[in-house]
């Protein structure tokens, strides 16, 4: 069978652009570890200066400067500022030094967290409501008015603000926390500031501020629930209250998942619920892996995100979910996830190739196809039962027939549950007496160059984890041969119509060697489904086909694999008697997950040898890799062969086919070698001329005798 901008990111970008005031969701934030800096309300580097009756509900520290002024009880200066009981002043001692080291580490930790899609550059924080996450400003940040931090009920919610240069909080501005949050105000709110931070007069500010290169200044009457830390400069206060927040880590209340395993056996399958292993991903999951049960299994876990998956789907079954098998769950809630595994009836594709290289004019429809005596359409996937089947056709005496692909030469094939197999019936017109080629004695026919096409099929999305939804298939058809291809058709088994979107550059209805045709088809899926398409085209009286399939997973948070193979023979035409042929196969991954256990087989050429492509040496076919294989064999007659590629990921197997025709010139008997070349009309002068000379000699002899008499 032959990556996307996230919708949430687009919506966020638009919201930021227009300064919308609704809740904005960001990437998850991780609180930095403060260690010895945690108990400091104020920590400066050069000086700490206070004017007025400031109160610090936390330690006061300075490193490596020597001047703390304006606080009662310090040796440097008696003043109206107070460090509350239970806390201490650390001036250029080991504790202050350790606290500065911890503050530096915390600053770097915050700076290293991603805020993709949450750039608030140029925007005022006032009036915004922000959910937990990481938010960034490439330069300055300003707060005028009120910033609301919505914890969404999470007691351990974390906010980090990355400010490239200065942070300015205007007079009277405020930060508030709504809907949860653990401990006292300011817990788990952090401001990583590139230069200076200024908290305006009478502002109420929440969070730990760590300024990198300049001072932290609290103007008259500002209240701060957090910490004021400058790594290399001063901290200046004026009649302020700074309170170190206390963060109480509260374990989230648990939730319950009721997980049901349903098995449908309506196509010959015999598996039961306990044959399927289910996995649950989340936080503090009571049983992460267990055998399925038709009655259901109750699993407890912390509130938050979760996903229920099957690590391995048994062969012949596809899994569909009820829609509650992934997402988020709140404390105290119970959700039911039902994963149904349906046994999949085998599918058989009968693929017709017609070769008219000896004057024939038949087309595919001239050869009716059958599976077990019932009519079949070339290229269309037929659903059949498990077991033995026979593929056949209505023959034509003017054509030699050969059966290949997954079928035996007599047309038989045994199918197992979930199989997708292809059988190719080739009809090659039989050579009759024909003139030799012009100007030579080889007596071989002119061989038509066969076409070669390739189709890739990619669904979007590859999975519908929330259940029923619309899937758009994109088919990319290429001409990988050397001759233009006409009469192109696309036969799909379930999605219709398949519409040509672009590619026919010169509008000649021919797939030229420099063209790529793109088709689309959309459909609604309510359960996991595999869709198959067959492309067919013609050139020089010879048909070419290629087959692609793709699986879309519905209701389960699993990305299915895709694989794609192309096969190019060299040469495409062999002279009379045949010769060596080299097939080059390229295997790629058009999906999103790496493939393991990649296999490639060929029904007419063995062994198929791996040449190159695994660039990182991990034995997995990654999405950016192309693996190359070759196979060499001798052909003595026109041959159609099929390569089959497969690979595994997320408990599923992807498969793709590539079909190629090589024409072998048909021979005509040579004329006797007399040493004289034949003329254009093949008149036998090499016989006539000697006979005329001989006859003339006899006549002359008789004439002379008569004269003597």
Image (cartoon, rainbow, N blue to C red):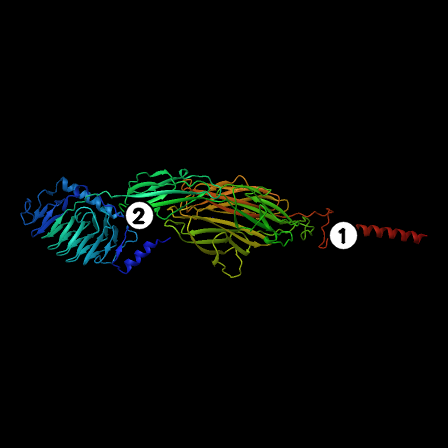
Is residue 630 among the parts visible in the rendering?
Answer: yes
Q: Secondary structure at mark 2?
A: strand
Q: Earlier in the sequence, mark 1 or mark 2?
A: 2
Question: Can you name the residue that lies furthest to the left here?
Answer: 78
**Label of residue 685 in the image:** 1
Foreground: 339 or 120? 339
**Is residue 375 shown left or right of residue 32?**
right
- x 33%, y 56%: residue: 10
Residue 541 in the image: x percent, y percent? 60, 54
**Location of residue 605 in the rendering, given as x and y in whole percent from the top left corner:** 55, 41
Q: CA distance from mark 1 to mark 2?
A: 94 Å
Neighbour class for label 1 at 10 Å: few (<14), some, many (≥20)? few
In the displayed structure, does residue 433 sit left or right of residue 15? right
Residue 282, quarter of the rendered image: top left
- What residue occupies the far front of the structure in this picture? 295
Residue 502 in sight from this viewpoint? no
Q: Which residue is mark 2?
A: 328
The answer to whether 289 appears left or right of 235 in the picture is right
Residue 524 image offset from top left, x and y in percent: 42, 54
| Residue extending furthest toward the bottom | 507
Disc ID at residue 668 = none
């Amino acid at each position: 069978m032959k990556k996307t901008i996230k919708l949430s990111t687009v919506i966020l970008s638009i919201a930021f652009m227009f300064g919308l005031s609704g809740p904005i969701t960001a990437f998850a934030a991780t609180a930095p570890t403060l260690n010895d800096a945690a108990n400091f309300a104020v920590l400066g580097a050069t000086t700490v200066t206070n004017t007025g009756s400031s109160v610090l509900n936390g330690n006061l520290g300075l490193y490596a400067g020597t001047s703390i002024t304006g606080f009662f009880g310090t040796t440097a200066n008696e003043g109206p500022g107070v460090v509350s009981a239970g806390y201490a002043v650390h001036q250029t001692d080991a504790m202050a030094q350790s606290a500065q080291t911890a503050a530096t580490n915390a600053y770097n930790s915050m700076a290293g967290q991603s805020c993709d899609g949450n750039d608030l550059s140029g925007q005022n924080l006032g009036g915004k409501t922000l959910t937990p996450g990481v938010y960034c400003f490439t330069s300055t940040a300003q707060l005028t008015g009120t910033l609301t931090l919505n914890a969404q009920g999470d007691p351990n919610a974390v906010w980090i603000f990355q400010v490239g240069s200065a942070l300015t909080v205007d007079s009277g501005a405020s930060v508030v926390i709504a809907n949860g949050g653990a401990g006292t105000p300011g817990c788990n709110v952090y401001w990583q500031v590139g230069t200076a931070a200024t908290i305006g007069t009478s502002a109420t500010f929440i969070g730990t501020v760590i300024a990198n290169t300049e001072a932290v200044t609290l103007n008259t009457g500002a209240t701060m629930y957090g910490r004021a830390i400058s790594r290399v400069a001063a901290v200046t206060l004026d009649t302020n209250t700074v309170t170190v927040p206390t963060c109480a880590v509260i374990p989230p209340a648990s939730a319950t998942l009721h997980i049901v395993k349903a098995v449908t056996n309506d196509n010959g399958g015999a598996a039961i619920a306990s044959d399927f292993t289910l996995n649950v991903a989340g936080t503090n999951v009571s049983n992460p892996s267990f055998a399925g049960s038709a009655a259901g299994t109750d699993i407890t876990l912390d509130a938050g995100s979760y996903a229920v998956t099957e690590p391995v789907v048994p062969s012949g079954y596809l899994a569909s979910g009820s829609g509650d098998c992934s997402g988020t769950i709140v404390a105290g809630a119970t959700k039911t996830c039902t994963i149904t595994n349906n046994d999949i009836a085998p599918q058989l594709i009968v693929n017709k190739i017609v070769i008219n290289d000896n004057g024939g004019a038949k087309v595919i429809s001239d050869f009716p196809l059958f599976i077990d005596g019932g009519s079949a359409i070339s290229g269309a996937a037929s659903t059949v039962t498990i077991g033995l089947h026979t593929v056949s056709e209505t023959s034509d005496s003017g054509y030699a027939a050969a059966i290949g692909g997954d079928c035996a030469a007599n047309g038989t094939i045994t199918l197992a549950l979930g199989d997708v197999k292809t059988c190719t019936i080739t009809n090659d017109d039989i050579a009759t007496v024909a003139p030799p080629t012009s100007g030579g004695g080889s007596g071989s026919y002119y061989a038509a160059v066969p076409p070669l096409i390739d189709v890739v099929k990619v669904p979007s999305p590859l999975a519908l984890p929330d259940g029923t939804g619309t899937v758009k298939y994109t088919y990319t058809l290429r001409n990988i041969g050397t001759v233009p291809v006409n009469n192109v058709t696309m036969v799909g088994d379930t999605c219709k119509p398949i519409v040509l979107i672009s590619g026919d550059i010169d509008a000649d209805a021919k797939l030229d060697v420099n063209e790529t045709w793109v088709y689309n088809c959309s459909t609604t899926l309510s359960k996991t489904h595999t869709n198959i398409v067959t492309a067919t085209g013609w050139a020089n009286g010879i048909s070419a086909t290629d087959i692609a399939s793709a699986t879309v997973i519905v209701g389960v948070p699993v990305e299915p694999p895709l694989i794609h193979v192309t096969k190019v023979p060299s040469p495409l035409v062999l002279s009379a008697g045949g010769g060596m042929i080299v097939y080059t196969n390229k295997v790629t991954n058009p999906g999103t997950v790496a493939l393991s256990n990649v296999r490639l087989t060929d029904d007419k050429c063995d062994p198929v040898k791996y040449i190159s492509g695994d660039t990182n040496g991990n034995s997995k076919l990654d999405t950016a890799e192309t693996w190359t294989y070759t196979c060499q064999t001798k052909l003595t007659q026109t041959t159609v062969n099929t390569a089959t590629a497969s690979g595994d990921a997320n408990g599923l197997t992807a498969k793709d086919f590539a079909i190629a025709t090589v024409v072998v010139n048909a021979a005509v008997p040579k004329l006797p070698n007399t040493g004289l070349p034949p003329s254009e009309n093949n008149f036998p002068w090499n016989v006539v001329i000697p006979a005329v000379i001989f006859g003339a000699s006899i006549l002359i002899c008789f004439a002379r005798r008569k004269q003597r008499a």
